[in-house]
Structure formats: structure tokens, C-alpha cells
Amino acid sequence: MARSRWIAAVLSPALITTVITAAVFTIPQTASAAPVTYQSESATISQGVVESNHTGFTGSGFVNFDNVTGSYVEYTVNAAAAGRHSLVFRYANGTTANRPLDITVNGTPTVSGLGFPGTGAWTNWQSVTTQVNLVAGTNRIRTTATTANGGPNADSLTVDVAGTEPPPGPGDTPVAKNGQLKVCGTKLCNERGQVVQLRGMSTHGIQWYSQCVKTASLDALANDWKADILRVAMYIQEGGYETNPRRFTDMMHGYIEEATKRGMYVLVDWHQLTPGDPNYNTSRAKTFFTEIAQRHKDKKNIIYDIANEPNNVSWANVKRYAEEMIPVIRAQDPDSVVFVGTHGWSTFGISDGQSETSVFNNPINATNFMYTFHFYAASHRDNYLSALSRIADRVPVFVTEFGTQTSSGDGGNDFAMSQRYIDLMAQKQIGWTNWNFSDDSRSGAVFKSGTCAGSNFTGTGPLKPAGVWVRERILNR
């Protein structure tokens, strides 16, 4: 993996109109009724046509927006009660370009530039979710193309009928539901022994992007994204911990408390990168983890990652470090799960031209821990995907970092390959955190440049295409 992704950016930065009479749908008068799906071909269409030449749609067809700004599809819905409702748009976009839509409700602009990134093929249908306020009775929900490419192929709109989903209550959060985690076999399990798959986000380096980890953004991550876990990336070198251990330890204490207040798990990430041998920082790691574990040992939401990306180092030396560090944490906190990075930038040696057998043949002598794996979908292709599948069958593994781009954290998004990883991780119940929760200029940062200076982090308006994509995959499980 290229080191460049870890360095902070210096600069932050016509057509014929067809109108089809809208069908009116009435939401049943019950708070417990199921969501209702409205077919796009039955909506009002301006500058678009109904087609059925791509398989996988529902209903009798889908709407192909004309390639023009201002083309739209308008759905008419009768809501039983006023309140907040979720809108789930099913679509396909066979191009690599985002095709954003503005959402208006009853003529009022509500969501600006809702992203509809490429799905890999016109026959690959995915969903984008947002929330809006509806009035009791008839509502007009219009989706309007904002670029000359028009919109995506629109299959359907699903609207919830229960109104507002309240913010998580004390018993609704990931930690309240699952409690103290533990490793059971090759899986991560909750306190009842049930397998769990955590999904969430990693911060960028907190020495560079602490402004992106604040009340409004964490509220959005917990309540709007419904994330299970926040990974806090604390670099050791590169302007990180070694420059001011007290400051960075206190920052980590603060982030742990913020995640705890929101009922999220928090991954304390000792983000060693350069030098790649974790033994270089053993003394610092012992000091840091002793204090963190001692203070937070009674919390149920703490996970420790003692080595981010070991590189240019043998597996034997990584193992030696892990077997020295795990007892340090266990002396303070005997119950929490510990993660350990693997050689080859946490690829089990794959990026070094080796294989996972070096770990299988010389495992870490410890319990209640997991190995970690990293991938960047545009760089790490089938051999990495196949390796992750084999690894998950043999040892406990958690994907603490991945991106839809190249290993630089930048470049074009390969959503098709990324989806193959997402599908595998869902099948094998491998937890993950995505890189990264910042407004860095690179494509791997989920927020548009400049977002973190403000206070709006909800919905898809502030998000880059990768942010739209990963938010949807955290929400839809």
C-alpha cells in the first residue's frame, strides 16, 4: 500500500417531454404497517421514458431519465400521518459518473444533490436512502436531475409508513443491544454468544482532521448512518503521538467518551505506519495502552488495535510484539477484545508476495483477539478477496480499514469490486470500518472538502460518491 494516502493534503480545499399521469398511493392507517413501494413507471415523468431493456427491475419497467438537467420523476403519496419518513430509491447507473438528484417535497427543496453513484452495470440495482418530512395526506416527491447526464435508471421508491424513526434510545444502540463483545471461534460475538458483524467508519489521522470528529459529525454517524463502531486513528509518528503523548492520550480519552455516550463501539487504533516494525514503538505503546485500559476497563464498548499496518517486517517480529503487548492490556482490562495487524500492511503478507500460511503456521499465543486485514478495492483484486475468504474460515479476522479506491486512498472508485468484498464480509460475518471519516481532498474521504468547517453532516448532500456508497452499506443490513 502506498504511503501517500496517510499524508494530509496541503490544500483543503433536449428532448421530448413525456408526461404520464401519476398514480396516487394511500398508506394504510396503521403505525405498524410495512413500507410501501411505488413503481417509477407509474409516477409523473418529465423528459424521460419507461423502458424494460435491462433485467433486474421490479414492476413492469423503469424510468430512463433523458440526459438533460431538469429531467424528473415525481411520485405522489398519501401519508397517514405527518412526520419524518425514510425514502429508499432503487436505481441502476451503468456509468462511472455520479448522477445526483435534487429532492423536493410538495414544491419545497428538501435534499440537494442526493448521490446516485455508478453501480457497475445497468443490470446491477442498488438503493440510496434519505429522510424527509411529509405532511398528512397527499405529498409530491420530485427527483430532478442536476447534471447534463440526467438521472440514473429509476426502478422504484419505497417509503416507510411509521413516520419518524426516533434517535436511538438507551436500549437501541449497538452497545445496549450487544454488550461486551468476545471472540467465539473465528467470529466476533455479543455477550449472549450471538455472532455480530460491526460496520462503521475510521477517522483520518486525528493530528490532521480532528475538526471532522465533533458533536455534529458523531451524532450523524450514530443516528443518521446508524454506525456500530468508530475507529479512532491515532498516528504515532508523522506528527502524532510521539510529538505530544499527553495531548494525544487525552484526545483518545475524549473520543472514547463521545462514542460511549452514543452507544457505539470504539476501536482504539495505535496507527503505527512508518517505521513499519511495531517493535520500534513498544515502550510508547505500553505507556499509552496501560493508561487507556486502566481508565476505560469497565466500559463494554472498547476494542484495542495494537498495530495498524506492520510493513517491511517479518511475521515472527509482529507476533513477538503482539505477545508482549496483549498481556499489558490484559493486566488492566481482562475482558475486551484486542486486534493485531498483520505483516504486509495488514494483508497477512499478501502485499509482500507471501500468503496467509505464515500466520496459520505460527499463530499468536493469546485468546480473545482477532487479526486484521486491509484492502483497497481498486488495487487489491481477486487474489486478496480469495485470501480474505480463506482467512475468515481459519482464524478470527476484522477488516479495520478498506476503501473503494486505490491503496493511495485516492483515484476512481471501483464500486463493483468493493461490493464483492462487502458481500463476502456479510456472508462470513466479518466486521469492518471504512477509511475515512474526513473532508480530505482525496476520493476516499467521505465528506466533500470544507464540510468539516460547518455543522451539516446528515443525509447525502455533504458526501462524496464514496461516502454515499459506504453510508448506504452501513444503513442497509
Image: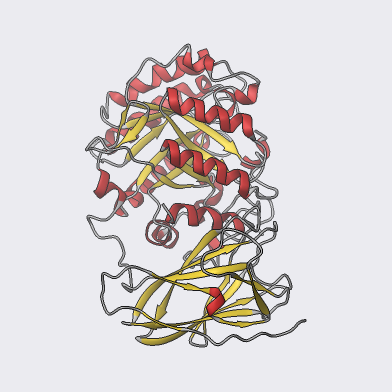
Q: Is residue 474 left or right of residue 181?
A: right
Q: Is residue 90 left or right of residue 268?
A: right
User: Residue pushed farthest right?
Assistant: 14
Front one among 5 and 397: 397
Instruction: Say which residue appears at 31% left-offset and 72% top-offset.
Output: 162
Front one among 240 and 34: 34
x and y, in percent, of residue 415 in the image? 61, 49
Query: Can residue 234 be seen from the camera position used here?
Result: no
Q: Is residue 141 above or below residue 262?
A: below
x and y, in percent, of residue 35 in the image? 37, 69
Q: Is residue 179 left or right of residue 344?
A: left
Q: Is residue 187 left or right of residue 55?
A: left
Instruction: Say which residue appears at 32% left-offset and 82% top-offset.
Output: 80
Query: Can residue 17 be seen from the camera position used here?
Result: yes
Q: Is residue 214 above or below residue 240?
A: below
Instruction: Say which residue appears at 47% left-offset and 43% top-offset.
Output: 433
Front one among 465 and 421: 421
x and y, in percent, of residue 49 in the image? 66, 76
Figure label count: 0
Image color mode? secondary structure
- Quick one: quadrant of the N terminus? top right
Front one among 143 and 325: 143
x and y, in percent, of residue 121 in the image? 66, 54
Q: Is residue 222 above or below residue 63?
A: above
Instruction: Say which residue appears at 35% left-offset and 52% top-offset.
Output: 258
Res 164 quadrant in image:
bottom left
